[in-house]
Image: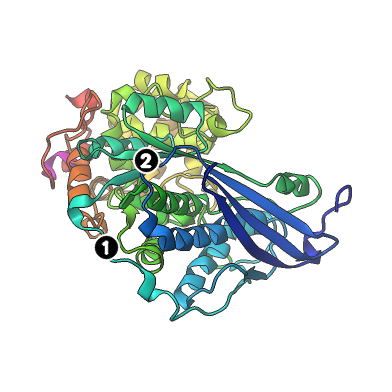
Amino acid sequence: MRGTTFDPRAVDAFRISDWDFDPRRRVLRLRYAFEGGPGPERFVETVTFETEPRDPDRSRLDAWHRAVTHLHIAAGTSYYKAAAPERVVVETAALTAAEAAFHHLLYDDGLREFAVTNGLPVPRPVRIEATSGEADRRSSIPGPTPPDRRSLLVPIGGGKDSLVVIEALRARGPTLFVVNPRPVLDDLVSASGLEAIRVRRELSPELGRLNRSGALNGHVPVTAIVSLLAVVSSVLYGFDEVVMAVERSASEETRMVGGVPVNHQFSKSLELERRMRELVTGSIDPGIRYGSGLRPYAELAIGRAFAGLTAYHPLFCSCNAAYRSTADPAQRWCGACPKCRFVALMLAPFMARDAVTGIIGRDLFDQAGEVDGFRALMSDADKPFECVGERKESAAALRMLARQPGWRDTVVVRSLRSDAEAAVSDGDVADLLDPDRALDYPDPAVADAIDRLLSPGGAPVTGTVSSAGRGGSRAGVAAVPGGAVPGPQGR
């Protein structure tokens, strides 16, 4: 109730109640409520599809309803966490066992960081309650779209990974997908010269009120929500493929808590991607292909490719500071957070020191006060709850820098060299720079285009797609641990 303290313990259940869509204004409203407590507490989230569809396909109406249903449940994590009751009641649709299991992952694994930071147990003791729907929908799902009609939708988040994907796929004419446009995203879309679909997600103002009145708060599986927004938009705008830009490094747990893995990036993990693909093809529309084009690659290999995309260097940003609602439109990197350190570390082996400093805004590697922050990127106990890569990737980058004249005498590299060299070998570095072919994107044409850009020597220096062949020689990779720089410095 207004003016009173909110007690999360008084809430018995979280209800995913109903939704409606205004096709004229292209506004989707998602409604939720808490059961129990002094309430009632109700939430209305709005999703505005700012880009007007050119020619909506009315034959995909069933797929639209199914996609919105799953978005509705996934987006509910933003409100559920205010109280985190054990029951989640889906009132909008029946769910198959597989569908309920998918959403249980979001409300358990996807909220484990939130649970740990709020002193709650992991795994999460949560139940997804919905009417069983095992046999009520399969006959209404349309058949797959012929391969020659496929069109690509690429979500762009402002960081280097999505830019690598769009440059690799430029010849295929991808359309970009932007959620909650910010100046940094607008600048990148403009620089790319590609068309974009823009969607605005506005959280219910009631959530902010509860957060000021004692509600629980913390990290939610936002990539899963964005992925389902992209799938909903694929139906609305007529796209057949959603190509994410998530690397294989995202699957590593951030911490082990009582023997239970807790991963800040769970909704970017390989497990969630596979479950999402099954949900899309099995429950929404088998004509939509979903997956990550960067899944075979570690962040280090992506950094090598992005080092050559110099046109984007002044514009891109992975730092959270630039995406806050209160951020100055001109703000980019804060130069003091784990993401700033990690991005700098992934680029440094392939770029000159002054170039990396020019991107971040300060020389992070020659500051004694930054040593512990870089050490944490390699730590089992202190790896930050942030979108940073595997521990061994950070160690591998430091091992590489320790052999490069422009970097080896910096305070950070000198301080952490022995730790890095104890953690990884030259062979480990080579493996991190090599793709895992078992994780290739399911469309061979997409996988091939991305591999051409990420192969050794494949990254262009002008922002255009390289002509390097798929499956490039490992000779260039194997040379890296010995000190060669296979990026712009080395050409």
Judge from the rendering whether residue 85 lies leftward or rightward of residue 410; answer left or right: right
| x and y percentages locating residue 466 in the rendered image | 16, 33
**Residue occupying the point 29% across, 46% down:** 152
**Residue occupying the point 48% across, 54% down:** 224
Query: Is residue 411 among the parts visible in the rendering?
Result: no
Q: What residue type is labelled 1?
A: Pro
| Residue 113, quarter of picture | bottom right
| x and y percentages locating residue 263 in the rendered image | 50, 56
**Residue occupying the point 19% across, 43% down:** 449
Q: Name the residue under label 1.
A: 144
Q: Which mark is residue 240?
A: none
Q: Name the residue under label 2.
A: 54
| x and y percentages locating residue 373 in the rendered image | 52, 37
Q: Is residue 365 above or below residue 455?
A: above
Q: Could you say whether the residue bearing mark 1 is in a helix, strand or loop?
A: loop
- Magenta span contains residue 60: no
Closest to the observer, 319 or 68: 68
| Residue 441, quarter of picture | bottom left
Crowd band around label 2 with a 10 angstrom C-alpha radius: few (<14), some (14–19), many (20+): few
Q: How far apart are marks 2 and 1 (CA)?
A: 22 Å
Q: What residue type is labelled 2?
A: Arg
Q: In which quarter of the image is the C terminus?
A: top left
Q: Could you say whether the residue bearing mark 2 is in a helix, strand or loop?
A: loop
What is the number of callouts on the image? 2
Which residues are drawn in magenta?
Answer: 472-477
Label 2 vs 1, first from the N-terminus:
2
Question: Which is closer to the viewer, label 2 or label 1?
Answer: 2
